[in-house]
Image (cartoon, rainbow, N blue to C red):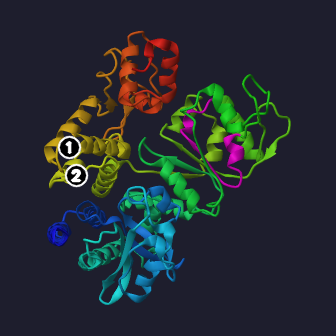
């Protein structure tokens, strides 16, 4: 008798939760200020956090490949989405059945059904055992436009019919949003003739490469990548720090004919000069002290694939000459070898340094500049992608809520507050702000006052001088007499060189090593959990400057 009563309570509780969820989804869909992408990702988040319908995904068709691809998801690993793990052919599996027939399909145990493609399921609480999978077609005017899929734990007290009824209603709300997105994309004026019926080739390129956004500035950069994706011409990615250069480099690789070959990335600013040559060109056994075996360099590892040289503006002049020879001769000669190795790779470079100034000051070779700057692509700062901020913030909210097991949501007004800020640190800064908000949230809601407090802290770190130049204020971490590195203004990029305390355009500020810095560096290492790159960013230094100080100060900077 007690078992029956418990089961009835479970059913009643599920119905109450589902009713409350539908009310919340209705409110979400009625928000005129929220973007369509934000609505869909928030919907999947609510399904997971309120109804325990996990790993929700909205699958949309790619007619050229005849497959269904993940367009929006909650909880699925982004790198696996990019690799196509969850992509399903039209004629296969449960998802394909729902797409072809327009009927709901489900299995109660993904390990016990031959029709189910097991690779698309994710473990719940570390196991695939007794996991159900539900696929509901998304219909608009009798036409299937996509598939909504979720996973759930088997529970004898919880009926699948309750979940199916809920998902049918949710899918009926989702359909108009997808149609509205399509109509908006078709109104994009800068390239109407090249948009496809799936919502725009460039938006689809962004989605398949985990690049979030649909603003005109972003799609203009995507368009340039698309135009040269199958060319062998070198690409140079330009823009401020934190604008996503590595993600664009990976997109250029994945969209190219070299997509099945290696993508090799190296940050020229993060490796000491003494090691950078070996990292790039490789070495033979015994070529120097510590060379106990032959080591392929990054250039040789990228053979037949793509080599991405990040922060190439920081590469020493002698290595620039060696790189130029490799690009001209298509051969690399490892340290200690007299036998050059043939290499064939696509080169992509990135820098936030103004190379034109570096050329004038003799810090960058003119011949190498013309060799690598064939296809320049400018990545817009976040302040020029206002309409993408909401979706990015929601993406990071969902990510960190899942990572830290927090059930949190934004209250009304937060997106407007985020859009009003200039974001001198770009996407990386936005990500940091949202992560901090999730960790500091005292309840299930992150309100406007909490975000304002965090943004006020961010504003206090940046100072704008009389000429409008925004600089990182590292006074909380270093002595006031220490010079700081300049940053672009959220409103307008300006440079100054009239004051001895300012840094000329394109130059980094180098600071003397003082004994009193040990405490500051120790604090930064503690805040970053020992991550030197993050500690360097906290102190406003490059990774190379930070490691130099660690070496100089020695044992004084031992981790706590």
- Judge whether residue 312 is colored magenta: yes
Give the residues drawn in magenta, as a range.
Answer: 297-316
Circles 2 and 1: CB atoms closer than 8 Å = yes
Instruction: Kindly indicate the quadrant of the structure image that contains residue 522.
Output: top left
Q: From the viewer's perspective, tell me whether residue 340 is left or right of residue 326.
A: right
Residue 322, percent across and down? 72, 36
Residue 408 badge: 2
Q: Which residue, given by chain and number where applicable, does mark 1 sit on? A: 441
Q: What residue lies at 45% left-to-right and 45% top-to-bottom?
A: 239
* CA separation in Å, label 2 and label 1: 8 Å
Relative to the observer, which residue lies in front, 94 or 514? 94
Q: Secondary structure at mark 1?
A: loop
Residue 310, percent across and down? 55, 41
Work out which quarter of the rendered image holds the C terminus and state it.
Answer: top left
Q: From the viewer's perspective, tell me whether residue 102 is left or right of residue 50.
A: right
Residue 514 position (above or below residue 66): above
Q: Secondary structure at mark 2?
A: loop
Label 2: few (<14), some (14–19) or many (≥20) C-alpha neighbours in 10 Å: many
Residue 233 position (above or below residue 482): below
Residue 461 position (above or below residue 69): above
Residue 176, percent across and down? 27, 78
């Amino acid at each position: 008798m007690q078992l029956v009563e418990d089961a009835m309570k479970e059913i009643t509780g599920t119905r109450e939760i589902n009713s409350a969820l539908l009310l919340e989804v209705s409110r979400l869909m009625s928000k005129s200020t929220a973007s369509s992408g934000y609505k869909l990702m928030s919907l999947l988040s609510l399904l997971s956090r309120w109804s325990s319908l996990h790993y929700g995904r909205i699958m949309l068709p790619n007619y050229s490949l005849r497959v269904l691809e993940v367009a929006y998801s909650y909880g699925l690993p982004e790198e696996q989405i990019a690799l196509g793990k969850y992509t399903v052919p039209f004629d296969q599996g449960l998802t394909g059945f729902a797409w072809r027939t327009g009927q709901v399909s489900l299995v109660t145990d993904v390990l016990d059904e031959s029709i189910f493609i097991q690779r698309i399921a994710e473990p719940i609480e570390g196991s695939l055992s007794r996991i159900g999978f539900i696929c509901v077609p998304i219909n608009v005017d009798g036409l299937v436009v996509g598939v909504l899929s979720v996973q759930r734990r088997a529970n004898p007290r919880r009926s699948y019919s309750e979940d199916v009824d809920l998902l049918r209603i949710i899918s009926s709300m989702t359909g108009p949003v997808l149609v509205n997105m399509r109509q908006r994309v078709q109104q994009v004026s800068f390239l109407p003739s090249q948009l496809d019926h799936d919502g725009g080739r460039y938006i689809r390129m962004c989605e398949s490469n985990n690049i979030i956004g649909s603003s005109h500035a972003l799609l203009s950069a995507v368009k340039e990548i698309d135009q040269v994706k199958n060319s062998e011409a070198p690409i140079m990615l330009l823009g401020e720090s934190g604008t996503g250069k590595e993600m664009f480099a990976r997109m250029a690789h994945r969209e190219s004919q070299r997509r099945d070959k290696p993508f090799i990335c190296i940050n020229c600013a993060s490796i000491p000069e003494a090691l950078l040559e070996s990292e790039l060109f490789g070495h033979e056994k015994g070529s120097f002290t510590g060379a106990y075996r032959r080591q392929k360099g990054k250039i040789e590892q990228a053979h037949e694939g793509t080599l991405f040289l990040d922060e190439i503006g920081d590469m020493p002049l002698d290595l620039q000459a060696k790189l130029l020879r490799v690009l001209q001769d298509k051969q690399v000669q490892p340290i200690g070898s007299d036998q050059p190795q043939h290499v064939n790779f696509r080169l992509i470079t990135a820098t936030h340094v103004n190379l034109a100034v570096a050329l004038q000051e003799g810090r960058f070779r003119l011949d190498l500049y013309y060799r690598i700057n064939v296809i320049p692509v400018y990545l817009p700062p976040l302040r020029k992608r206002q309409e993408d901020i909401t979706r990015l913030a929601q993406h990071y909210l969902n990510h960190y809520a899942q990572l830290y097991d927090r059930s949190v949501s934004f209250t009304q007004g937060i997106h407007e507050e985020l859009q009003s800020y200039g974001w001198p640190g770009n996407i990386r800064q936005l990500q940091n702000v949202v992560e901090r908000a999730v960790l500091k949230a005292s309840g299930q809601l992150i309100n406007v006052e909490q975000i304002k407090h965090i943004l006020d802290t961010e504003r206090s770190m940046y100072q704008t001088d009389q000429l409008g130049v925004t600089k990182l204020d590292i006074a909380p971490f270093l002595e006031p007499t220490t010079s700081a590195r300049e940053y672009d203004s959220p409103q307008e990029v300006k440079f100054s060189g009239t004051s001895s305390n300012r840094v000329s355009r394109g130059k980094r500020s180098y600071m003397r090593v003082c004994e009193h810095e040990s405490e500051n560096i120790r604090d930064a290492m503690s805040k970053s959990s020992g991550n030197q790159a993050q500690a360097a960013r906290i102190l406003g230094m490059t990774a190379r400057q930070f490691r130099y100080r660690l070496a100089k100060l020695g044992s004084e900077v031992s981790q706590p």
